[in-house]
Image: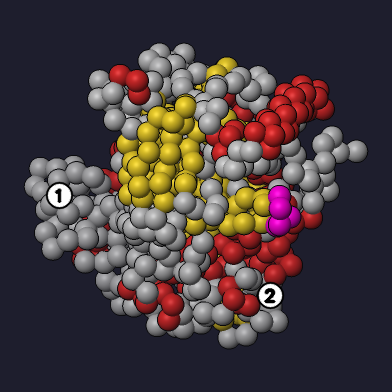
Amino acid sequence: MTWQTVQSAIPNFAWRAVLTCMICILCLLSGFQGGCEDKQDRRDELLFEAPVGPEGGTIVIPSSDPALADYAGTTLQVPSGAFPGPVTIAFYRTAGRDTPGARFVGAALKIVAHGSASQVAQDILHISMPLPDGIGASGDRNVMAVEWPSGERFLTGGLTQREPGKPPQLLIETPKLGSFFPVIYPLGPAMPEPLIYPLDVLLVVDNSSSMSAFQSLLFQHNGSNSVQKKSLPWKILNSSAVDKCKPAKVANSISNIHMAVVSSDLGVMPKLPIAAGSDWSSPLPTAFTAGKCGPRGTDPMKKHGNGDDGELQTKRCTERGITDSTVCPSVCTDPIPVPETGLPYIRKWTEFDAKKMDIVTYPEYATGKRPETAIHCRAILGEGGCGIEMPIGSAAQAISRQNSMPSGFLRDPATSLLVVIFVTNEDDCTIASARRKDAYPSSAKYVTNRSGLRENCGMLSAPECFNMEYRCFALDNQCNENLSMPGSKTGCKTKSVNPNPYLASVEELVKQMASYQDGMGKTQYRSIGFVTIAPSGSDFETEYLPDGMMTTMLTPYLNIKQQKKTYVGKDFLLGPQLRYEKLYQLKNSAVATERFIDTKLGDAVDFVIKQNIEALIDPATGQADEMELNKLVDALHTKTAPFLKLQKAGIDSGFTEPCP
């Protein structure tokens, strides 16, 4: 926030303070016993009120009364336990006001909880307010200006919901009640600084074989806080970038965050009927029909092998048969690790309490039911997923699913920041949709090709291409050495030109994650960032393996040889990676031809942080190196800080602006 903005806001608040004092004096002179606060409330017109008990409920301002027409349909959802006792929720008509740089629209509303000692609920409330028809139709961003009883004012993003035949609604989350003013900002660079961007974090966890050690490394939790505090989710949710312009306890603290988990498992079979006459080229091998990459049902003709299909994971590790209490503690046996019934994500809202000069967190979870605990219980996925890892494709599918079947995890893409964090020990192998039918070569052709003659890997029936993990490299990458022969491979990189790609384009997958349709049906891009926690090496070694069909080595096939690192009896397998390097290159390369072809997409991708997963291992303990993990999280907070910084107009509650 600029000093000029602060100057322009202070006189209004100063004048209001003087006016308030004059009212207080009149109150005292007149002998009014209700107090100045009650007298000030009387300046607002009471519209509607409704009782709410500890069990919570939904309050809707009715449309039957013409006097309430401007507010008809306004909804307040109060979760169970938000207020410890019965309260009366009162809705007042209040004077709307423009905010510097924004235009006030709709109807201003003041919401008060009478009978409660505090206007702060013990959980996050959901408020939906109507907007005039046509507002935001040009692509302008609808946000909410909020004023708390203390005089603090800020802006927060929300979700503009449009349903046929109904006026548009602006939905926001808040732990506090106060005055709410719908405002709009022009789409583009005019978006102001004092906006709190909701942060949505998607953890994409590789759940193929050899991943247990890495899941334990980053999501360790044996039931004790001391261990849990050394994990990735805890550090993301409970630390922040340092900002010397603010009091020490409020240094860019995350203020509004959703976090969810998705696996790397998209199966490998085509999304087509698996029956005679389909373009599945041959009878399905047993490994596909009954294995980890096969259909998830008993009827392979109907249940396709699409793995978890980008679904947000809610199963606890105890439900996955993981019995190691050092990573899957007994707290995970709780049917609801956090009191968020039915939500496939966790949420955490952090606010600064000016009176206490401390951070207050909402919802207020019971002991052992913290949001971090829910993430731990969900992120320990085990090793039951398909060995053909497709983390980038899974993230794209998860976001597409949320757009088509929203759960509330993703907020308004115009006013939120999405961060996708990949955790894997191998490269991405997101097969292009049209090539899924080629995932397994013709078994008949395999049987007739026992001569040991090498075929080019462009021929998908080549025996040396049978290994899927190898094929993920062979068809889309190039090295200094011949990929069809065993031995070391150096200087490996993704092909810049590939007329017949096997894998989906990294840029196209990023575009799928970042793009959305605005109210006019135009393609826009959300702000998005990526963190890749994967092996750093791009070089690797291939080796011949027996095919399992013959006792001789007449028809061996090629395999990627993983590096094995052992620390304190724990084995960590590391595979090469090129696709994550490509993702990093698209954003960070100094060479224009290596960056995003779509320049608008390049602007939408705010950052790509690359983290060597091996560097996070403490060789002395086999656990996470806390210093290195802190560096990673600090880098993430530094990148997200511009979006999460809480800057207020008017009363600054201890914040120092401008900062020298």
Residue plotted at (69% across, 78% down) = 619
Classify 589 as above or below 228: above
Question: Quick check: can you spot residue 466?
Answer: no
Q: Residue 237: horizontal and vertical position, in percent?
A: 59, 58
Q: Earlier in the sequence, mark 1 or mark 2?
A: 1
Q: Which residue is mark 1?
A: 274
Quarter assignment of residue 228: bottom right
What residue do we see at 52% from left, 42% from top? Answer: 177
Tell me the element at label 2: loop
Query: Observer-nearest residue: 98 or 150?
Result: 150
Q: What's the amino acid at mark 2? A: Asp
| Quarter the N terminus occupies | top right
| Foreground tag (1 vs 2) | 2
**Quick one: 616 or 132, which is closer to the camera?**
132
Asked which quadrant contains residue 288, the reply is bottom left
Could you say which disc has been placed on residue 618 in the image? Answer: 2
